[in-house]
Amino acid sequence: MSRNPRRMGGLGTFVAILLILALIAATGYVIWMCVDLVNKEAPTVPTDTVALPTEEAAPTTETTIPPTTEPPPEPERVIATATISAQGDLLMHKPVFDTCRQSDGSYNFSSIFRYLTDTLSTFDFSMANLETTFGGDNYKYQGNPEFNCPDPLAADAKEAGYDMLMTANNHSADTRADGIVRTVEVVREAGLGTLGTQLNDEEPKHAIVEINGIKIGMVCYTYAYSHDGTNFSLNGLMPIKDVGTVNFFMNNNLEKLYTEAEAIMEKMKEEGAEATMMFIHWGVEYQTKENATQNKIAQRLCDIGFDVIVGGHPHVVQPIRLVESTVDPDHKTICMYSLGNAVSNQRTGYSSLFPAGYTEDGVLLSVTFEKYSDGKVYVSAADIIPTWVNMHTTDGVKEYNILPLADSTRDQWRETLGLNDNTIGPAEKSYNRTMGIVGEGLTEIQDYLAQAKIDREEYYYNLAHNPELLETEATLPNAA
């Protein structure tokens, strides 16, 4: 019997479809099982499950410290300054103090200092030479040859701005031994210091003045006469009764001065003096240049160690110079040979002894000391203001005015110093006379002090920052 081929093909197709459906169903089941497993919560780990130990980090034993840099040491610096001014002779001739007499018979000397007070106020300490005595009513009030001035001059000098008066000069004994003592008393009662004369031999023959923390040792001497080496007199008058009341020397026995100056220097240093000044009455009157004896004395005082020498007596201005020590190459001394007159009646044409105009002139010398933080003190500056005595009459009133002729205020002289067409010319001539005498020496001194300051600052800088650059025993010039 024979088969139908069409019928056999339909059956195969049917079977194939069933197999495909079964495969699809199986695949879907497998996929569902996987999704179900993913969606189930993870099993909770029991709390008493012990975790495996982990390795701890080893402790650090070293601590890193950032590097530090210490600041460089500071160089020594200036911690104090003191400026001292000195003027020449308050040469109190009778015509001068007569202009200060009031209608009631009392005296007021403020007119003499009217134009000077503001200038004095710029200094830390001011001095002048008292070329008269305060002998009181027991002696005649007069000028040369035996000076005796009314007492109010002392108080008015204090009011003007002075702090100390030099009282050792050739007129100190014009009112004899009691006048020496009384002058010291009157000056001190007015609140001023005295230098050069004492109440008795027990008092110090020097002074230690502390100015802004700097101790300045000061001493004042005057020349004297002696015919026999035992009796001493000033101005050719009676012998000094108590030689301990006056600091004096003799030109024919300078060793007395040097011996005493050395002893006083040692004493001042023991008492803490950090710088020293010598005020000395010497030389020849009316000579505008120092003589050989002055130079000789100045050299020896420089060698002894004085930092500044200030001279008077000639009644005219003499040069200022820088003296170099012959025993200490690092020490130099400023020497003003004569300050001239601060005030007097020694006018042009008054006497043939006076060089025209020069006795009307004076200088206001200023010296500045600096103290550094290491305790050393140095002379750091010096300057000069020329002064002129303007004698004039206004509305019938006669006056003697000390005028400070500072070059920096020259265009204001008329206004600030009361000058007019008649007096401005003489003032300018006075300025030129004085600067013609002191200008060259002053420039030398100022240049030296300026360079010494530069060298000092460099030394201190290297001492702090570059000590290897300095010699083992390096020294600084002009240390007091």
Image (cartoon, grey):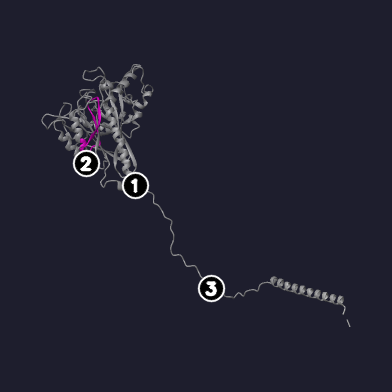
Circle 2: residue type: Lys
The residue indicated by pointer 3 is 53
From mark 2 to mark 3, how far is it between C-alphas? 89 Å
Q: Nearer the viewer, residue 262 or 47?
A: 47
Circle 1: residue type: His
Do the residues under discs 2 and 3 have CB atoms within 8 angstroms?
Answer: no
Residue 405 position, x and y percent, is: 33, 25
Q: In the displayed image of the protein, which residue is found farthest to the right?
A: 1
Do the residues under discs 1 and 2 have CB atoms within 8 angstroms?
Answer: no
Q: Is residue 100 visible?
A: no
Residue 318 sits inside the magenta stretch: yes
Rendered-image quadrant of the N terminus: bottom right
Q: Residues within 10 Å of mark 1 (few under 14, many from 20)?
A: some
Please tell me whether mark 1 or mark 2 is closer to you in this view.
1
Disc 2 is placed on an element classified as helix
Q: Nearer the viewer, residue 226 or 307?
A: 307
Disc 3 is placed on an element classified as loop
**Disc sitting over residue 465 in the figure:** 1
Disc 1 is placed on an element classified as helix
From mark 1 to mark 3, how far is it between C-alphas? 61 Å
Residue 315 sits inside the magenta stretch: yes
Q: Quadrant of residue 294?
A: top left
Q: Going by the image, does 11 lie left or right of 408?
A: right
**Segment colored magenta:** 301-325
The residue indicated by pointer 2 is 267
Establish if 48 lies above or below 409. below
